[in-house]
Image: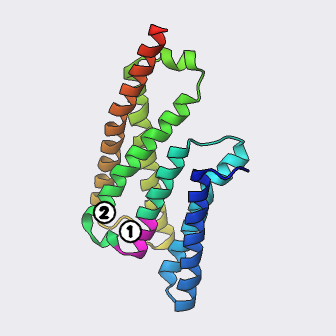
Amino acid sequence: MKLTRGRLLEFGFVLFMAVILVTSIIEGEWFDASVAGAGIVSGLIPFILEKTFKTEFDAKMKVAYIIFLFASQYLGSIVGLYSNGWWDTFLHVLSGVFLAFLGFDFLSRLDEDIRLEMPKRFVFVYIVVFAMAGAALWEMYEFTSDLLLNTTMQGNGNDDTMVDLVAGSLGGIIAALLVTEIHRKEQHKKRKN
């Protein structure tokens, strides 16, 4: 296992959350402890997936993922920025962008000749739908958590869910515009060669 910058950032985040977990348990801050525990598991997901499926995610994707975890779990939940109404919506826009680039990462793993033959419109729709599906899956998770664990992830119920879905979709559309331009440039470069 080579220690790349992305891997160091992942393990650094996990260590940071482990320190918060221990400190929170000592201080009897059970909510912070539960968030830190979830942060440890979440921070290890890229490592576990890479080892399980013998693949490697793009380093920029891993950095974006860890930044998102830090913003949501530490800044949002532990520091308390979720008390600002806009923080949740902002993070859902960011998650839409992140999911769009994750979809593009999956697309870029296809054979280059096949990938570059795909029309720009298809790439745009695929990226937007990928981001929207991710946003919908997250909202299902929030609903299930509220129903089974008696959490309050959905805040204002349907209003929260719809704002989150729209925000995630908007982030996906913004990123899809950029991804489609990257795809167009790759196609143009191949045609020139």
Q: Is residue 152 visible?
A: no
Q: Position of residue 67 (x, y in %)?
A: 45, 57
Image point (35%, 75%), residue name: 80
Taking the magenta stretch, the answer to whether it contains residue 1 is: no
Front residue (pair 21, 129): 21
| Disc on res. 178 | none
Kindly identify the amino acid type of the residue bearing the numbered disc 1: Gly
- Mark 2 neighbour density, 10 Å: few (under 14) some (14–19) many (20 or more): some
| Image: 9 above or below 118 | below
- Mark 1 neighbour density, 10 Å: few (under 14) some (14–19) many (20 or more): some
Helix, strand or loop at mark 2: helix
User: Along the horizontal axis of the image, is 180 left or right of 20?
Assistant: left
Which residue is identified by label 1? 76
Q: Position of residue 183 (x, y in %)?
A: 42, 24
Q: Alpha carbon of mark 1 to alpha carbon of mark 2: how far?
A: 7 Å
- Span of residues in magenta: 72-80
- Dividing the picture into quadrants, the one containing residue 9 is bottom right
Kindly identify the amino acid type of the residue bearing the numbered disc 2: Trp
Q: Position of residue 58 (x, y in %)?
A: 56, 41
- Dividing the picture into quadrants, the one containing residue 57 is top right
Which residue is identified by label 2? 87
Taking the magenta stretch, the answer to whether it contains residue 78 is: yes
Helix, strand or loop at mark 1: helix
